[in-house]
Image: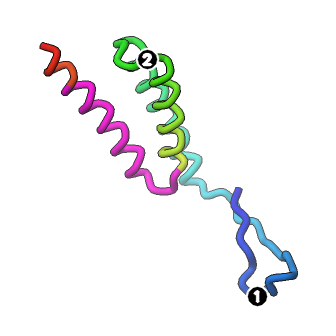
Amino acid sequence: MFVVCDATATPSSKHHRQLEQDPASAMKLQIAAPLIAALVYRAWSHKSLTPVGIATAFATAVVHAIHPWGVFFVLLAAFFLAGSAATKVRAS
């Protein structure tokens, strides 16, 4: 929930109005949560990250997922998958 100061209120009046949550953000959460779970599962099952790395990746993914712009989460997922693929090529 977001709280925004009313533009007509004086700074000392503490008059705030609450904005209703955008329905698009709820849909974004429904899409992001399974994707985060899939990325964490992949990192765990392929042993590509340590447990601390998985926890850090999870926290980073959540922060990127709650951002209003979805592009940051998509770029983070692409970075993880590309990095995993590049590591596999180097190891071969």
- The structure residue drawn at horizontal position 30% and vertical position 38%, both measured from the top left corner, is 78
Disc 2 marks a residue whose amino acid type is: Thr
Q: Count up the numbered dots.
A: 2
Q: Is residue 81 rendered magenta in the image?
A: yes
Secondary structure under tag 2 reads loop
Instruction: Report the Cα–Cα distance between label 1 and label 2.
Output: 52 Å
In this rendering, the label closer to the viewer, 1 or 2:
2
Q: Quadrant of the N terminus?
A: bottom right
Determine crowd level at label 1: few under 14, some 14-19, many 20+ residues with C-alpha closer than 10 A. Answer: few
Specify the label residue 64 is tagged with: none
Of pointers 1 and 2, the one earlier in the residue sequence: 1
* 60 is higher (above) or lower (below) than 70: above
Q: Which residues are magenta?
A: 67-86
Question: Which picture quadrant has residue 23?
Answer: bottom right
Residue 64 in the image: state x and y as whole percent.
Answer: 48, 45
Q: Residue at x 59, y 47 (%)?
A: 26
Q: Is residue 47 above or below residue 7?
A: above
Q: Secondary structure under badge 1?
A: loop
Residue 8: assigned label: 1
Mark 2, residue position:
50
* Horizontal side, residue 18 vs residue 59: left or right: right
Q: Position of residue 31 (x, y in %)?
A: 48, 38
Q: Residue at x 80, y 72 (%)?
A: 16
Residue drawn at the location 69% of the way across and 61% of the way down: 2
The image shows residue 51 at horizontal and vertical percentages of 49, 17
Q: Position of residue 3 (x, y in %)?
A: 73, 65
- Name the amino acid type tagged 1: Thr
Q: Which residue, as the protein is rendered here, is positioned at the far right? A: 13
